[in-house]
């Protein structure tokens, strides 16, 4: 890579150092009321979330609307500040050695709304070239780079570079967004519902493109979606979130085999099946998630959980390895033999089988 | 790992790119296809052109009166639109009067547009305390009707053209600021502004490239609709003796001095008002067309 236009931020910690370590991330949005903006209450959008993203993997984040997926994504790119906790990017702590500007040199994001994420007044090439130009690349080089990236995402620069976003289809716009996110050579790309708004055939093309680009540029993805099939297709590991907390995290196939947390099981049961004999008529989970302003005490899922016992409402579960596997963790009292939950022993035996 | 950029040198000059029309040329093309904009634009163009080139139109002296030929009716030979109460040629005075009236209509709005946009974008983009200070100050001005405010400021500053411009500018800053603030606040939360922020650009560059370009057209359209209001307010100030002073030709002032002639020759007395009406109508219809032409999402 002799004359790379934009230098990628060099790898620091080696392959063993996780690219991102998130420790006890918290983000509460205060709702102010009254004339003088007195703090009335807080939405606990992300409450004590910890996880790691390994180099070169794709971490899928799933969960219902309002579970904190998008807030987590915005924290990872530094668009939403954290109230407490640590965000460590390749061994450097944000706010310490790592400034926001440094973080933005390594992390980029593809947003859900492909139209709102493109400036309607800039041509496609100017949109893609903006990032590199802000980092000191000359206008001509940045445009040449934009043309290369357009080619790479499957849009002929001769036809598309000079166009405006409203002249493109949704799938084409999302390709532009992907090209834009790659223009400054990030190491981590956050894809926040990046394919959710596309129709199925276009979605498949974009997913394949993402897979190719990942290999080509040595990227790491955090892939947020509510579509479990898509997440399974693209992810190496899955993180399941509920009401601002991580309830289960682990390698995708392991979670597919053993849904350790009752919420994960309910989420998977809600997936439509292709087999008409497999038709589900009873909703696996009733009602809406509780209000994150005043989340339930103890285990946040206990209000909707079929296995809830009185102790679930008082004690907060800690993440336990599922079937003795430290890669696969879930936060449920039924996995903790010392919790006192009556089904704990049976459940542990069931999962170990 | 492939590298982007390595092949730039090898690929030579980029192939010819098909370029879409730029934003402003698109707006121009849409305006040219709009019959309303064409007709009233031509009208306004004629009024402004006549005002600018008034000395070269071979008109009579707008200040030279004649006691013998006072209040001659429309169509009098030598005085196409008659004469006023001091026997001055109405046609010349109406055209010369357009100079001051248009100036008083356009300049305050132009100044208020510049100041209000800066204040509103600042308040909308920064938010928080800055927003509270700017917008609550603006709210104070909203407590007074705009006519009253213009009269009060003019009266405090004293009569005169410059003071009229200053007072009208102050009257128009609050509404423009408010529009600018609300448009900016909605654009600020769009994802392309987030995307621009994470590309590492400074806040100033983000505002200049990504916010300003998208908020300036709605603010501009709103401001153009204020020019007619400004013209009428300026005429009102002159009518009250707070703006332009006699013997200067200005439509509002002419309405004032001619009002005693309303029983003798009502048509002559109404002529300055007709000019104000036509010009405001042109400006309003043109700003409507501009609003449509500037809407990029068809």
Image: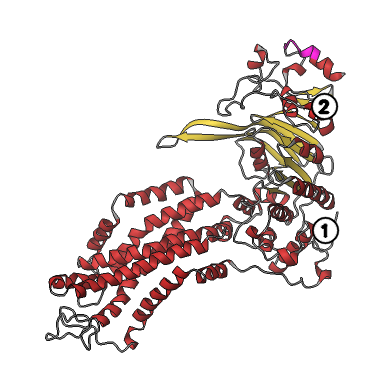
Towards the viewer: B87 or B142 = B87
Mark identifier at residue A326: 2
Please state the horizontal and vertical placement of residue B166, each as a whole percent of the image.
Answer: 32, 65
In three-dimensional space, the C-alpha distance between marks 1 and 2, rounded to whole angstroms, equals 36 Å
Towards the viewer: B180 or A42 = B180
- Which residue does the image show at 75% across and 49% down from the upper left? A202
Towards the viewer: A348 or A197 = A197
Look at the image and tell me whether residue B79 can be seen: yes
Q: Is residue A285 left or right of residue B103?
A: right
- Which residue does the image show at 82% across and 29% down from the upper left? A256
In the figure, residue A294 lies in which quadrant? top right
Check the residue under mark 1 and report the chain it is in.
B
Mark identifier at residue B3: 1
The total number of labels drawn is 2
Q: Reply above or below: A247 against B199.
A: above
Q: Is residue A298 left or right of residue B28?
A: right
Magenta stretch bounds: A340-346
Please state the horizontal and vertical placement of residue B16, each as a whole percent of the image.
Answer: 74, 72
Residue, far front: A276
Co-location on one chain, circles 1 and 2 = no
- How packed is label 2: few (under 14 Cα within 10 Å), some, or many (20 or more)? few
Q: Quadrant of the N terminus of chain A?
A: bottom right
Provide the secondary structure element on which disc 1 rests: loop
Q: State yes or no: residue A341 in magenta.
A: yes
In the figure, residue A265 lies in which quadrant? top right
Look at the image and tell me whether residue A17 can be seen: no
């Amino acid at each position: 890579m002799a004359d790379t236009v934009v230098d990628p931020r060099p790898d620091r910690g080696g392959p063993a150092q996780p690219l991102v370590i998130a420790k006890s991330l918290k983000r509460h949005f205060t709702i102010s009321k009254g004339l003088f903006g007195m703090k009335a209450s807080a939405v606990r959008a992300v409450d004590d979330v910890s996880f790691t993203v390994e180099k070169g993997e794709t971490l899928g984040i799933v969960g219902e609307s309002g579970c904190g997926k998008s807030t987590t994504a915005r924290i990872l790119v530094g668009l939403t500040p954290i109230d407490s906790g640590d965000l460590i990017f390749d061994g450097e702590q944000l706010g310490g050695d790592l400034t926001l500007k440094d973080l933005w040199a390594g992390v980029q994001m593809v947003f859900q709304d492909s139209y709102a994420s493109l400036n309607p007044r800039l041509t496609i090439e100017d949109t893609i070239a903006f990032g590199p130009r802000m980092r000191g690349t000359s206008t001509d080089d940045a445009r040449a780079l934009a043309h290369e990236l357009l080619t790479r995402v499957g849009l002929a620069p001769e036809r598309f570079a000079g166009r405006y976003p409203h002249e493109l289809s949704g799938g084409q716009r999302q390709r532009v967004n992907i090209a834009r996110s790659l223009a400054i050579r990030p190491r981590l790309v956050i894809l926040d519902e990046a394919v959710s708004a596309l129709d199925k055939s276009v979605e498949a093309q974009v997913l394949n493109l993402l897979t190719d680009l990942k290999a080509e540029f040595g990227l790491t993805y955090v892939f947020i979606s509510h579509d479990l099939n898509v997440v399974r297709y693209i992810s190496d590991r899955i993180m399941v979130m509920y009401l601002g907390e991580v309830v289960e995290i682990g390698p995708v196939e392991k979670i597919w085999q053993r849904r350790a947390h009752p919420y994960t099981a309910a989420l998977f049961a809600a997936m439509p099946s292709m087999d008409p004999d497999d038709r589900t008529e009873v909703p696996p989970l009733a009602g809406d998630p509780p209000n994150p302003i005043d989340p339930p005490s103890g285990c946040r899922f206990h209000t909707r959980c079929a296995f809830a016992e009185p102790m679930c409402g008082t004690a907060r579960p800690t993440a336990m390895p599922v079937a003795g596997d430290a890669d696969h963790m879930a936060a449920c009292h039924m996995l903790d033999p010392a919790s006192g939950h009556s089904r704990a022993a049976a459940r542990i035996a069931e999962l170990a089988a | 790992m492939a590298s982007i950029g390595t092949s730039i040198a090898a690929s030579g000059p980029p192939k010819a790119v098909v370029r879409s029309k730029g934003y402003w040329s698109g707006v121009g093309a849409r305006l040219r296809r709009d019959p309303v904009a064409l007709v009233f634009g031509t009208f306004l163009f004629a009024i402004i052109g006549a005002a600018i080139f008034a000395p070269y139109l071979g008109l009579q002296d707008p200040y030279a009166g004649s006691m013998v030929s006072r209040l001659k009716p429309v169509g009098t030979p030598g005085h196409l639109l008659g004469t006023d109460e001091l026997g001055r040629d109405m046609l010349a005075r109406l055209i010369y009067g357009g100079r001051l009236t248009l100036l008083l209509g356009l300049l305050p709005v132009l100044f208020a547009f510049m100041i209000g946009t800066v204040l509103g974008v600042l308040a909308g983009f920064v938010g928080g305390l800055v927003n509270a200070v700017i917008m609550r100050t603006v709210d104070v001005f909203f407590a007074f009707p705009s006519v009253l405010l213009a009269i009060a400021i003019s009266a405090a500053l004293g009569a005169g053209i410059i003071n009229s411009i200053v007072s009208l500018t102050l009257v128009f800053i609050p509404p423009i600021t408010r529009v600018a603030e609300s448009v900016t606040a909605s654009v600020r939360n769009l994802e392309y502004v987030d995307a621009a922020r994470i590309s590492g650009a400074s806040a100033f560059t983000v505002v200049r490239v990504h916010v300003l370009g998208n908020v300036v057209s709605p603010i501009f359209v709103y401001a153009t609709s204020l020019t007619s209001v400004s013209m009428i307010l300026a005429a009102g100030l002159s009518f009250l003796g707070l703006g332009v002073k006699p013997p200067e030709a200005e439509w509002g002032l002419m309405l004032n001095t001619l009002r005693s002639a309303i029983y003798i020759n009502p048509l002559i007395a109404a002529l300055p008002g007709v000019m104000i009406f036509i010009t405001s109508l042109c400006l309003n219809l043109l700003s409507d067309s501009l609003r449509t032409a500037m809407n990029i999402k068809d």
